[in-house]
Image (tube, rainbow, N blue to C red):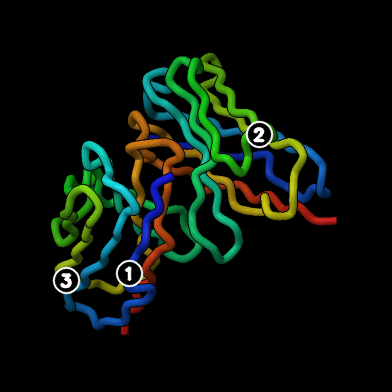
Amino acid sequence: EVQLVESGGGVVQPGGSLRLSCAASGFSFEQNAMHWVRQPPGKGLEWVSLISRDGGVTLYANSVKGRFIISRDIIKNSVYLQLNSLRTEDTAIYYCTRGRQWLTDIWGRGTTVTVSS
Amino acid sequence: EIVLMQSPGTLSLSPGDRATLSCRASQSVGNNYFAWYRQKPGQPPRLLIYDASTRATGIPDRFSGSGSETDFTLTISRLESEDSAVFYCQQYAVAPLTFGGGTKVEIK
């Protein structure tokens, strides 16, 4: 069974940092790009970032460029999102998704990030 | 950035009804790299349709997608209670990937 399990969310003050993790299983992790997508409370979906199969290509939404860093570890079958200089508008559920090329086909259940003083 | 506008915002229908959801893109979506998702309350989105008209694994044939370039449609031929959800469209042709604002389907 394909599974994505996110962790690392929590409550953080504005300007703070968090590192989200996503553990993948049930598929050939090294054959797939990976994405992060977020959803603020009661709102719609916003694509955040993508990392290619080999990690050589990373892309970011303008709203997080320069503050968030995506990475992956093929040995641990995991993808990460480092969140820096957090703002209140970064409050959201963060979903890890498998990428079939750029299609986000399988989604985890998400981890919640709350930025508040 | 390709902006996606979904309509209507809310759809209220009865079980067994046919639902038609629309999504219009601000510019042409190359290769028909266009998808639809259903998000039930408290759950992550689930992929229904990709490449504009291909059903994802395990999705019943009452869901169908159509359209090209800037106008896309999701049709649900016979609504069921589990379709009480928000439906999102998405383009994955160019970065940044973008989603529409969603259509909420209410089952009477």
Task: Decide: is B17 above or below A102.
Answer: below
Residue A108 is situated, as x and y percent measured from the top left of the image, at: 48, 43
Which residue, given by chain and number where applicable, does mark 3 sit on? B78
Subunit ID for the residue under disc 2:
A
- Residue at image coords 48%, 35%: A35
Which residue, given by chain and number where applicable, does mark 2 sit on? A68
- Residue B57 appears in the rendering: no
Q: Are marks 2 and 3 on the same chain?
A: no
Callout 3 environment at 10 Å: few (<14), some (14 to 19), or many (20+)? some
Residue A44 is tagged as none
- Residue at image coords 29%, 59%: B24
To which quarter of the image does residue A21 belong? top right
Q: CA distance from mark 2 to mark 3?
A: 43 Å
Quadrant where the image shows the N terminus of chain A: top left
Q: Are marks 1 and 2 on the same chain?
A: no
Which residue, given by chain and number where applicable, does mark 1 sit on? B7
- Could you say whether the residue bearing mark 2 is in a helix, strand or loop? strand
Judging depth in this view, the residue of A76 and A54 nearest the camera is A54
Which comes before the other along the chain, label 3 or label 1? 1
- Residue at image coords 18%, 55%: B65
Callout 2 environment at 10 Å: few (<14), some (14 to 19), or many (20+)? many
